[in-house]
């Protein structure tokens, strides 16, 4: 039992204890309820509608392909083309995609993926349009429908796969918004315990006052007790209702399947969400009222003992100071906890990279980007697509240019240099590193360098299986032995352009080849027409038809074929140690009429971003460190072991997907990697002239016409179709009025 002299200090300490307990209890209740309610309004208002837009885009696209196929294969194809149903579906897909981009909750990675989808969607629509224009030619029509289907449904890099990736991210957001983890349950447990402690303090204080002051009730403290007693049950009821609503919303959304009327169903389940999410404000108000009632109930009793001067020892003054310090610290913790929901983790930056590499090539390049991220602490969002031009144009037009774009041709670099959104000059960024590139690999455009070859490949080669021990020329004479596929989604037809370019280079030499690439020769006459005729003579009609319906990566180890004309990048297919290669001129009879030259290709890195992180990435890609990270990256899925080289099969494991570089100080493959070593030496061989892929140097309209001309020709590889195709290509070249002169000089094609 306290004495009168002890009453005032006891009341002061109890007041402080009640205020501290009020802060802790209300703070814990606020944190616990906020954990349930913080994202609740987002579920019906944004997350589920965003998922609905992605689902609607996917459904419209699937339906559009069915509609186009049915219309183009029907009797009214000549008059109706793709049909009204296709046009309605594709328009719906564009509208839904626009809404999905505006509302996505998948973060910057999801936004970037949807930007890529927008470009791919334009490519898909174009391929369907090409199928409609070819409706009278069943083979060509079906080939274009196949390419459109591949653009839509290709694993990992197709439109549907990208939409599924965005939907997975949004489903993860929905799950986090609607789930209650163990930490939240722990917070509720702590909140209830603190509530009980505060309730006990209030009741115990009233019992003390009854004994000391002989009064049955202390009105303010009784009011605070009643308010506290009603607060927690009310909060628990609201939290349980909100959790139940969120659970029903998640079940209705199916964890990602949001289509039809699902968004409206979710909105109906959560119609009370908005008033439930306002409860945290009530908690703060209740805390203020309880604190005020506590002071109002105890302060008069303290004042009754104001004349009782009780000397305080130094220890008590120190304890009072410590108590005040603890109270202040608790308030700071509460404020920090309340604000933590809006805090963002610190980043050193984020950049976007757009490139043409998918599948195994993408897997390898991502490891280079990971090495860059580890060194510079920058997040990288990578988007790989064969519809690179459409995607890049879409992003440039939307004012959302990637920081770094890897362009697959010099022609594209030149075109963007002359556009409204040009890439940045690289000399100020790379400095002396540019000296390691020759003029073919870092071409000057208007006296300035805008792109560097970060990866090169050898063409003019034929792959085969040496275990078959057959004469290669005899195999080549039988047209059905070629593993020829023209499919490449948005760029379908490019394998055929490689054939014609290589034939022309070997038949007529690099001077004629360079003139043709610059647009200085007619397509329908002379050496160019001869190359087309040679190309047509390689395939019988059955092989030509098969080539239209197959992708470019068909293996030489299949039972249907034995030879493949492809660049060194084909090593990323299902090749094993058994493959070998020889120059094309040693396989095709009658084409080796000039000194040996090799066709090569390169991927050019360009800089669109202004940030220091983007400049650092350009320097990293051009550095030996970046090249080494790329060369030493573990093989991607499906790459297999090391192939043989130059007519022999290697017996040791290796690195079949290894990239090749053109700078003198770049890491080179060792002798143990036979094929890689042979390709690397051929790329560095100064005795054999090298010429860039001619179509990669041409204006883009000319290149696309060339690709589609190959497809048109293979549908009926005869003199009449050749004359028609080459006449069309002449008209395109004439319409372009010679090669692009944006830089003031023609592009360099050969060394």
Image: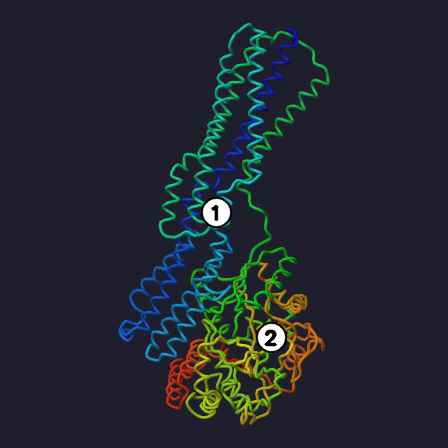
Coordinates of residue 107 in the picture (x, y in percent): 50, 52
Q: Residues within 10 Å of mark 1 (few under 14, many from 20)?
A: many
Residue positioned most to the top:
214
Coordinates of residue 497 in the picture (x, y in percent): 48, 81
Of residue 477 and residue 53, the one placed in the foreground of this image is 477
Residue at 48% in and 30% down = 235
In this view, the mark in front (2 or 1)? 2
In the rendered view, tell whether residue 73 sits above or below residue 330.
below
In the rendered view, tell whether residue 439 sits above or below residue 349.
below
Coordinates of residue 486 in the picture (x, y in percent): 47, 78
Residue at 41% in and 84% down = 713
Of residue 362 and residue 483, the one placed in the foreground of this image is 483
State the scheme by which the image is colored: rainbow
Residue at 63% in and 55% down = 377
Q: Quadrant of the C terminus?
A: bottom right
Q: Quadrant of the N terminus?
A: top right
Of residue 140 and residue 384, the one placed in the foreground of this image is 140
Q: Which residue is mark 1?
A: 174
Judged left or right of residue 504, residue 63 is left
Q: Residues within 10 Å of mark 2 (few under 14, many from 20)?
A: many
Coordinates of residue 693 in the picture (x, y in percent): 53, 80
**Kind of element beneath mark 2:** loop
Q: Which residue is mark 2?
A: 575
Q: Sequence-wise, which precedes: disc 2 or disc 1?
A: 1
In the rendered view, tell whether residue 24 sits above or below residue 720.
above
């Amino acid at each position: 039992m306290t004495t009168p002299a002890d009453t005032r200090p006891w009341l002061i300490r109890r007041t402080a204890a009640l205020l501290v307990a009020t802060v802790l209890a209300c703070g814990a209740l606020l944190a616990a309820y906020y954990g349930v309610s913080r994202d609740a309004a987002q579920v019906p208002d944004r997350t589920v509608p965003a998922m609905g837009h992605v689902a609607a885009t996917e459904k419209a696209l699937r339906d559009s392909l069915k509609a186009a196929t049915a219309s183009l294969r029907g009797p009214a194809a000549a008059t109706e083309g793709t049909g009204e149903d296709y046009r309605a579906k594709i328009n719906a897909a564009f509208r839904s995609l626009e809404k999905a981009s505006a509302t996505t909750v998948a973060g910057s990675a999801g936004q970037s993926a949807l930007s890529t989808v927008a470009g791919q969607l334009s490519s898909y629509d174009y391929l369907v349009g090409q199928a409609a224009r070819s409706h009278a030619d069943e083979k060509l029509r079906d080939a274009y429908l196949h390419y459109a289907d591949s653009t839509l449904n290709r694993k990992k890099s197709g439109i549907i796969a990208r939409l599924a990736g965005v939907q997975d991210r949004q489903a993860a957001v929905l799950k986090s918004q609607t789930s209650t983890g163990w930490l939240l349950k722990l917070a509720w447990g702590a909140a209830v315990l603190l509530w009980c402690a505060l309730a006990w303090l209030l009741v115990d204080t009233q019992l003390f006052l009854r004994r000391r002051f002989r009064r049955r009730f202390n009105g303010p403290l009784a009011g605070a007790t009643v308010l506290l007693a009603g607060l927690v049950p009310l909060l628990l009821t609201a939290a349980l209702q909100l959790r139940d609503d969120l659970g029903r919303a998640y079940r209705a959304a199916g964890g990602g399947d949001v289509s039809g009327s699902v968004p409206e169903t979710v909105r109906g389940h959560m119609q009370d969400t908005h008033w439930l999410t306002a409860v945290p404000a009530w908690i703060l108000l209740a805390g203020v009222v309880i604190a005020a009632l506590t002071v109002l109930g105890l302060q008069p009793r303290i004042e009754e003992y104001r004349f009782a001067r009780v000397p305080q020892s130094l220890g008590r003054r120190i304890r009072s100071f410590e108590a005040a310090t603890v109270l202040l610290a608790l308030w700071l913790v509460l404020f920090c906890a309340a604000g933590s929901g809006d805090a963002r983790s610190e980043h050193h930056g984020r950049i976007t990279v757009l490139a043409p590499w998918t599948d195994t090539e993408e897997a390898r390049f991502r490891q280079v980007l990971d090495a860059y991220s580890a060194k510079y602490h920058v997040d990288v969002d990578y988007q790989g697509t064969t519809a690179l031009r459409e995607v890049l144009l879409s992003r440039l037009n939307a004012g959302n240019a990637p920081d770094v774009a890897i362009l697959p041709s010099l022609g594209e670099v030149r075109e963007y240099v002359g556009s409204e959104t040009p890439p940045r000059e690289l000399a100020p960024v790379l400095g002396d590193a540019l000296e390691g590139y020759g003029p073919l690999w870092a071409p000057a455009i208007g006296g300035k360098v805008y792109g560097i070859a970060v990866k090169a490949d050898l063409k003019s080669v034929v792959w085969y299986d040496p275990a078959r021990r057959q004469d290669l020329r005899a195999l080549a004479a039988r047209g059905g032995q070629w593993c020829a596929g023209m499919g490449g989604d948005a760029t379908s037809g490019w394998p055929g352009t490689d054939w014609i370019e290589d034939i022309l280079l070997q038949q007529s030499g690099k001077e004629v080849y360079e003139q043709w690439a610059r647009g200085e020769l007619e397509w329908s006459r002379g050496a160019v027409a001869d190359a087309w005729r040679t190309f047509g003579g390689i395939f019988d009609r059955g092989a030509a038809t098969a080539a239209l319906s197959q992708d470019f990566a068909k293996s030489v180890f299949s039972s249907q074929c034995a030879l493949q004309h492809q660049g060194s990048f084909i090593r990323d297919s299902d090749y094993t140690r058994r493959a070998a290669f020889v120059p094309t001129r040693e396989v095709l009879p009658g084409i080796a009429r000039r000194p040996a030259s090799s066709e090569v290709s390169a991927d050019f890195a360009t800089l669109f971003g202004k940030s220091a992180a983007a400049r650092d990435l350009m320097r990293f890609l051009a550095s030996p460190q970046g090249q080494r990270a790329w060369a030493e990256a573990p093989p991607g899925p499906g790459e297999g072991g090391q192939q043989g080289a130059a007519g022999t099969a290697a017996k040791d494991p290796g690195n079949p997907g290894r990239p090749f570089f053109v700078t003198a100080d770049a890491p080179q493959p060792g002798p143990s990697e036979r094929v890689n070593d042979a390709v690397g030496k051929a790329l560095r061989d100064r005795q054999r002239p090298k010429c860039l892929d001619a179509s990669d140097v041409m204006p883009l309209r000319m290149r696309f016409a060339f690709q589609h001309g190959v497809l048109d020709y293979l549908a009926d590889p005869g003199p009449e179709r050749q004359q028609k195709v080459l006449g069309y290509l002449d008209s395109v070249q004439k319409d372009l009025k010679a090669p692009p002169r944006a830089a003031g000089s023609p592009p360099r094609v050969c060394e």
